[in-house]
Amino acid sequence: MSIVDLPLLPLGKGRDLDAERGVECPGDLPMASDPSLVARVRAAKEALGERVFVLGHHYQRDEVIQFADVTGDSFKLARDAAARPDAEFIVFCGVHFMAESADILTSPSQRVVLPDLAAGCSMADMARLRQVEDAWDALADAGVQDTVVPVTYMNSSADIKAFCGRNGGVVCTSSNADVALEWAFGQKPGAKVLFLPDQHLGRNTAVLQMGIGLDECVVWDPRLPGGGLSPEELRRARMILWKGHCSVHGRFSEDVVDELRAAHPGINVLVHPECRHEVVLKADLVGSTEFIITTIEAAAPGTVWAVGTELNLVKRLADAHPDKTIVFLDRDVCYCSTMDRIDLPHLVWALESLVAGTVVNQVTVDPETEAEALVALQRMLALPGRSHRA
């Protein structure tokens, strides 16, 4: 049984070549205190013109997202990049799996750049290909593999998407997970779903939107033999949830919801489905990042909201809607630490390198992985209803 095999990289040293991640920049980064950083980004973008297309995920810091040509969730941004075939360079201000998805969906002539290759995703890294293949073999040993359909959240590596593609599975987003599960359960008689890599999105969707019982959901722990589950537990289960989570959304707790309701009578609690099930049960509204944004935008002036998602976005919503009271659903400041690695010095370095004719931090997916991942993505795109919304 494999264990988590992420290399331990001292800050500023070393690279994980297999995963195309690292924390070295082959060049000199500008100082964060350099007062000319903003002007340098503007000048580099102007010099590159239509050759560059800058994508900014909603969780990026304000200093970076101000330079994005488009903003959005991960899949929306990847599709936006694919819709700009004339852009030679796609600079993705997000994290590694997002840049991989952009590389999969864009043309071979386009090059995807991630300003800092250390901008990864802890959730995506909780499901490594070797672990998932070991689990797949263990499901065969337990006599249930033939009934299992793998479904992976967009927040997963390209090789996990490819695993789903070659094993009859599909990709989903946080807004169409229920549609993807309906599709998966319809693929085989008595079908079960192996949901990767976020147990909370899988559980919340299955129980609250599909009517599946909590007792029909089991958690596969890749660090334990047989996932820590007996063959009988696997036979009874309809949802096999991978033991993964978002390090930000997993922090939100029920007691903070109770505290905020006591302090602000009439407060509306709005959370992302990556939150723990107990938190989602206490919320008034649950939905994807885009759903959170549109809900706040449409809310009446004077309303009070507690929002359970990444702090950069919550702060941006509060600044954009001063007629509403918007608070963060946590006692502590909690940014997405890997997303936050994309800063102005890295953006300046990446763009100025492109101006100088050097492509740095290019993220590429090998042709075989790309082809199989694209199968799973195309299955999602073929689904009815909300399949095209991030």
Image (cartoon, helix red, strand yellow):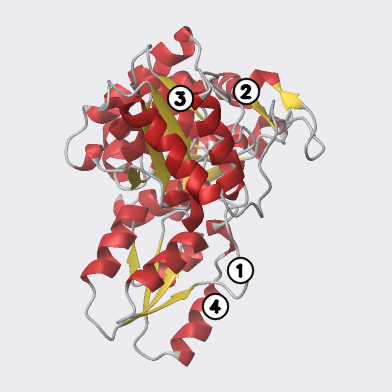
| Secondary-structure class at tag 3 | strand
Instruction: Name the residue beneath numbered marker 1.
Output: 333
Residue 112 image label: 3
Labels 4 and 1 touching (C-beta < 8 A):
no
Identified by mark 1, the residue type is Val
**Who comes first in sequence, dot 4 or dot 1?**
4
Q: Which amino acid does label 3 sit on?
A: Val
Element type where label 1 sits in the image: loop
Q: Classify mark 4: residues with Cα within 10 Å, few (<14), some (14-19) or many (20+).
A: some
Mark 3, mark 4: which one is toward the viewer?
3
What residue is pinned by disc 2? 20
The vertical placement of 369 against 27, above or below, is above
Alpha-carbon span between mark 1 and mark 3: 31 Å
The label shown at residue 31 is none
Q: What element carries label 4?
A: helix
The N terminus lies in quadrant: top right
Number of residues whose C-alpha sits closer than 10 Å to that of mark 1, classed few (under 14), some (14–19) or many (20 or more): few
* 34 lies left or right of 304: right
- Whether residue 66 is visible: yes
Q: Are marks 2 and 4 in contact (CB under 8 Å)?
A: no
Q: From the viewer's side, name the closer residue of 238 and 181.
A: 181
Amino acid of disc 4? Val
Image coordinates of residue 342 in percent, x first then y, are: 57, 44
Residue labelled with disc 4: 256
Disc 4 to disc 1, C-alpha distance: 14 Å
Are the residues at dot 2 and dot 1 in contact (C-beta closer than 8 Å)? no
Query: In the image, what residue type sits under mark 2?
Result: Glu
C-alpha separation, residue under disc 2 versus residue under disc 4: 38 Å
Foreground: 126 or 303? 303
For marks 2 and 3 on the same chain, the one whose residue lies earlier in the sequence: 2
